[in-house]
Structures are given as structure tokens and as C-alpha cells.
Image (spheres, grey):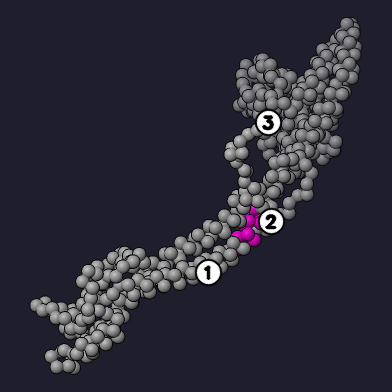
Amino acid sequence: MSDSADFVPEPSVTTSLWRDSLSVRLLAVTIGVILLVELLIFIPSAVNFRDNWIDERVQAARIATLALDTSPGRKVSEELAAELLANAEVLAVSEVRPDLRRLLLSSPQDPDAEMHWVDRTNEPWFARARHMFSLLLLSHDAILSVSDVSNHKDARIEVLIAEMPLAREMADFSRRIIILSLLISITAGTFVYLLLVAMVVRPMRVVTASIINFHNDPGAARAPHAASSRKDEIGRAQNALADMEREVSDAFRQRQRLAELGEAVAKINHDLRNSLAAAQLVSEGLARSEDPRVQRAAPRLERVLERAINLTEDTLQYGKAKPPEPNMEIANLHSMIAEAAGEAMAAYPALKLSNNIPRGALANIDTDHLHRVVVNLVRNAAQATARARAEGGEISINLKDNVLFCRDNGPGMPEEARKNVFTPFAGSNSKGGTGLGLAIARELMQAMGGDVVLDRTGPEGTVFRIALPDIEQT
């Protein structure tokens, strides 16, 4: 059995939630900031209280000395002097001239009392603030000697004041300020806290809960978030989160469709390969025919069947990290384009095909990959042009530098198709199309070091650019 002294209780869930809560932290920070502001206000207020208290006593001492001006020899009885000092709340009053110091009013004082000197005509603010803080810490009797201007020209007045009454009143003033500051801080902090909860914390709770739920199950079906009308950072974060959830949900649906497509292709692949194998046997039998027309057509039929078999296998590989590795070789670009474009245009005899590739152009390419790319582009162009034109439809293929241009005079692509032209299952503009052709075409060209790009599209037609790795003219 383990020693009970080794047991350390875990913090409760409630305590942890309070400690980690954004709203609690905001409340604490708000109160702390308001208290700091109150402290910054308190210091000059307390300094002014100290100055006013001293000035009131000095002014009362000046008034008391006026009674001496009406008495013979500027002297009064001890009883009157004591009364004047008591009314002024001071201990003694002296008049100082350049060549003379005269004690005007005086009362018995503690000779051991600590003495502090203050010159009210030339006292820096920091010295006043330092004296204010020392008064708050004063715990014994002390005497403050204050020097200021007198009622008479070329004279100064010095007033001795007991500091303990000033220290007590300063403590009372500070206590009132602290209590008032606490009340203001709590009240203002509560209002600010409620505003922050309504404007920040609650929306962030919704965003946080959405992020957590999305993290736990990103593929789960959930109601889309309504767009926020707020224009600030929180509103933009809410809208960005809603857009992200929508996009990721679409991506999951596309992934599901890809998985379903892969499963369907896998199921039919065996039967399709058997059918194509049977077709290959027939083509081999035709190749042995002595008919010249059959002998000319048989090699082309064999290549078409071989590409069909490769296509079924490549489709199974679609979606993996890498496209099929290209088998690069030097090939005649004109004849290769003619064969691929002719295959794509076979179903559209009314359309005109212009192969403007120089007959001596050689390219370092994978012929099967480029064949599939050209077939996809030309077939798409033929479908669009045939739908829009009963006659006069034309598709041309040109070469400039290392770039092939596949151009048609069809109606152009709609806006939605332009945005998703290379997106699988989203870029198709034909009924029943999967949108996979151009995505595969780009992937095949990029594997060869080239690319496929939509150059322009509009009512005058559509142009695709095929960037090739190497071209040679002979």
C-alpha cells in the first residue's frame, strides 16, 4: 500500500476551468488595469492633498502674524500666542530677513523630535511625492519646517508644523481613495467584463467549440455556420472557419468519391483486362492477314488496345502521391500529335483539324503520356465546338518555342468550369463527364517536367498551352 503522504490530489475540473477561462482572465486584467490607472491618479492627488494641507497652515500662520503688527513691539501675551498657534494648527512662526531671524510665535516643543525641511518656493515635484510616501509610513512624532514668502517685503516666513496630524489625514485620504478606487474598479471591471463576454468571449466560445468538434471529426456532417456580419477580427475568423469547414467537407466528399471510383474501377478492372486481352488476340490474328488494309490498321489497333490497358491501370493509381513515372524518349512531335488528335477527332468528322507542327520537330517526351494529354484536350475541344457549331468548327495545334497551343473556335468555357478546370470531379463541362481528364493531363505533363495551362477562353474560343520539356527542329 502506498504512503498517503505521497498522494497529491489533482486539481478539480471546476478550478481548472476557472483558471483557464478567458472570461475570468479578462475580468482580472480589467480590474488590474483600472487599479493601475487609479494608482497613477492617486499619486498626484495625494501630492496635491499634502501641498494644500501645508499651504493652509502656512496661510493661517501668516494671518496669525498680522495680529502682531497691531500690538506694541510686535509682541503678544503667552495666552494670545498659544491661541493664535492653536487656531493656525502650527507650533511656531518665525520671520527671516537677510540679516535677521526673529521668532514671532512659539509653543513648547519636543527637543528630540525629528526635523524635516521644506521650501515651498522651490520644491521639486519628485521631492513632494517622496515626502508624501514618507508620511504614509510615519510612525513617530516629527516636525516639519516650512519656508515660504512672508507678508512683508524682503522677508520669509518659517512655520513649524507637527507632521503626525498630516500623516493621519494623509492616511485617511489614502484609505478613502483606495476604497473608492476598488469600487470604481469592480464596477467598471464588471461592465467591461460583461461587454467583453458579449462581444468577444461568447463568439470565441462558439469558434472554439466548432474548431474542437471539427478537429475531433472533420468528416462529420454538420449544419454550416451562418455567415457573420461582423467586420472585425472575430467576424473574419468566424467566416474563415465556416469557409474552411465547407471546403474541407467538400474535400472529404471528393475523397469519398475517389475512393468509390477506385473501388468501382478495381471491380471492373479484371473483366476489362480480360476483354482487352481477347481483343489483343483478335488483333494478333488480324495482323497475320495478307490484306494490305488490315496489315496497315493492325499496328494502330494494337497500340490503341495497349493504351486502353495502361489507362485502366493508371486510373487505379490516380490519387497517389506520385503520378506514373515517365519513360522519356526522343519522338517526332508532328506524327505523334497527328495520331493522338486523329484518335480524338474520329467521332467528329465534320470538324476540321489543323496540325501545324513542323514535320521535323523532335521532343524528349513520354509518348504515351503526351498522347493521353493531347487526346483529352482535343476531345474536349471537339465536344464543345460540335455542340456550338453545325459547320465551320475547327481545332488547330501550333508550336511556338517549347509550347504547344491547342485552339478551338467553340463557345468558350463557363465561369464555374474556368475556376475548376483542373480540379478532379469538378472541372467537367460536359454532361456525364467526371472532370478527371484535365486533372490527369496536367499531372502527366508535370511528371515530364512540363505543364498544361488554360491560356484564354471566351466567345471566340478556347486555347490551352502545353509546355514541353525539350524541342528540336530538324
Q: Nearer the viewer, mark 2 or mark 3?
A: 2
Say which residue appears at 55% left-offset and 64% top-offset: 189
Position of 8 with respect to 326 (left or right) is: left
Q: Quadrant of the C terminus?
A: top right
**Which of the two discs, 3 and 1, labels the residue nearer the N terminus?**
1
Q: Position of residue 140 (x, y in %)?
A: 31, 68
Q: Which mark is on residue 228?
A: 2
Say which residue appears at 67% left-offset and 36% top-offset: 455
Q: Which residues are magenta?
A: 195-204
Q: Tell me the SS state at disc 2.
A: loop
Q: Amino acid at mark 3?
A: Val
Q: Position of residue 385 (x, y in %)?
A: 80, 36
User: To which quarter of the image does residue 306 belong?
Assistant: top right
Q: Tell me the SS state at disc 1.
A: helix
What residue is pinned by disc 1?
Answer: 183
Q: Nearer the viewer, mark 3 or mark 1?
A: 1
Give above or below for 349 relative to 286.
below
Q: Position of residue 42 (x, y in %)?
A: 41, 68
The front one of 9 and 440 is: 9
